[in-house]
Structures are given as C-alpha cells and as structure tokens.
Image (cartoon, rainbow, N blue to C red):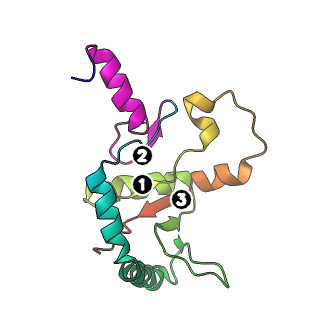
C-alpha cells in the first residue's frame, strides 16, 4: 500500500494523470497536472512502435487526404499543412463558422458514436492559471470557439 490516506491517494492519482475532470469529450483540467504514467512495459511498447512510425505517418496522411476530399467544396474548413511543410497529421482538425455550429456538431457527432472534441481550452481559462498575466488572445479565443478535433487514428 502506497498511501494510508484515501483522500491523499486520490489527489496524487488526479494530479499524476493530468488533473483531468471527467467529461464525455472535453479536456478540462482543474489544476496543474502531470503525465507521470509510464511503466517499463509502456516504454518497451513505445520503442517497438517506433519501428512502425513511417507506416503510421503514411496512414495518417492518407486519412487526412480522405478528409480533405470529403470537406472540399464544403463550408467546413479542414486544416491542412502549410506550404513547404510536411505534416504528420497527428490530429485532424476542422474549423466551423461559429461556436453554436461547433457545439451542434459536437453534440450530433458524439451522440452518433463519433468521438469529436473541441480544441483544448486556452491556458488562461483554466482555474489554476486564471490569475496569470496574458496578452491579447482574441485570435486564439476566436479559434477556440470554432475548432473541432475529428477522429485521427491510424486504424481509420
């Protein structure tokens, strides 16, 4: 037994698993958290996965191409790699016209079993950073209200 205090054990688990608050699709963090979860077996799996990284990137780029084709000529904007760059398309993202459209899309897609998520909340909006200094974030705030992360697995 690592802890003899259940409340302290829960607190330790919470902050070592990124201090995420459970939610069906949003990433909400209620304090500063860390990602301290890598046993040796996970490290070994990671090394083995590196052997397949080229294939994974190829599959992700193929999926991104399918998304580009699907969203072409649509009012939904699919984020693509900038000119003279090569993206690994770790995360595929679309941009909707408004926060209301984003929320409707999130509700409808998730209710149909398609896991979509909004962009992560801006750091200054998280409780633990609410009093931190920041500059003009109007562009980031505009994007935060419109971005949706769409399925990006290599298994798609």
Dot 3 or dot 2, earlier in sequence: 2
* Image position, residue 133 (x, y; %): 75, 33
The CA distance from mark 3 to mark 2 is: 12 Å
Q: Is residue 80 above or below residue 118?
A: below
Residue that label 1 marks: 117
Residue at image position (64%, 29%) is: 130
N-terminal-most mark, 1 or 3: 1
The residue wearing badge 3 is 147
**Tag on residue 26?**
2
Q: Is 22 part of what is drawn in magenta?
A: yes
Secondary element under disc 3, as helix, strand or loop, is: strand
> Are the two marked residues, 1 and 2, in contact with CB atoms closer than 8 angstroms?
yes
Q: Residue furthest right?
A: 135
Q: Nearer the viewer, residue 132 or 140?
A: 132
- Magenta extent: 4-30
The image shows residue 128 at horizontal and vertical percentages of 57, 29
User: Split into 4 quadrants, where in the image is the N terminus?
Assistant: top left
Q: Quadrant of residue 66?
A: bottom left
Q: CA distance from mark 1 to mark 2?
A: 6 Å
Mark 3 crowdedness (10 Å alpha carbons): few <14, some 14-19, many ≥20: many
Residue 68 position in % (x across, y down): 48, 82
Counting residues from the N terminus, which is met first, the one under dot 1 or under dot 2? 2
Q: Position of residue 117 (x, y in %)?
A: 42, 54
Alpha carbon distance from label 1 to label 3: 9 Å
Residue that appears at 29% across and 63% down: 45
Left or right for 64, reference 40: right
Q: Nearer the viewer, residue 36 or 84?
A: 36
In the drawing, does residue 102 fall left or right of residue 40?
A: right
């Amino acid at each position: 037994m690592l802890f003899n205090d259940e409340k302290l054990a829960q607190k330790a688990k919470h902050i070592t698993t990124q201090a995420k608050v459970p939610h069906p699709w949003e990433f909400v963090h209620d304090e500063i958290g860390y990602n301290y979860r890598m046993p040796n077996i996970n490290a070994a799996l990671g090394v083995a996965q590196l052997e397949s990284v080229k294939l994974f990137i190829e599959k992700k780029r193929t999926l991104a191409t399918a998304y580009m084709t699907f969203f072409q000529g649509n009012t939904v904007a699919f984020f693509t790699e900038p000119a003279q760059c090569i993206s690994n398309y770790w995360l595929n993202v679309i941009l909707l016209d408004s926060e209301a459209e984003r929320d409707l899309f999130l509700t409808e897609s998730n209710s149909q079993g398609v896991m979509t998520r909004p962009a992560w909340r801006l750091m200054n909006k998280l409780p633990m950073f609410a009093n931190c200094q920041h500059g003009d974030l109007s562009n980031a705030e505009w994007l935060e209200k419109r971005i949706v992360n769409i399925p990006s697995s290599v298994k798609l």
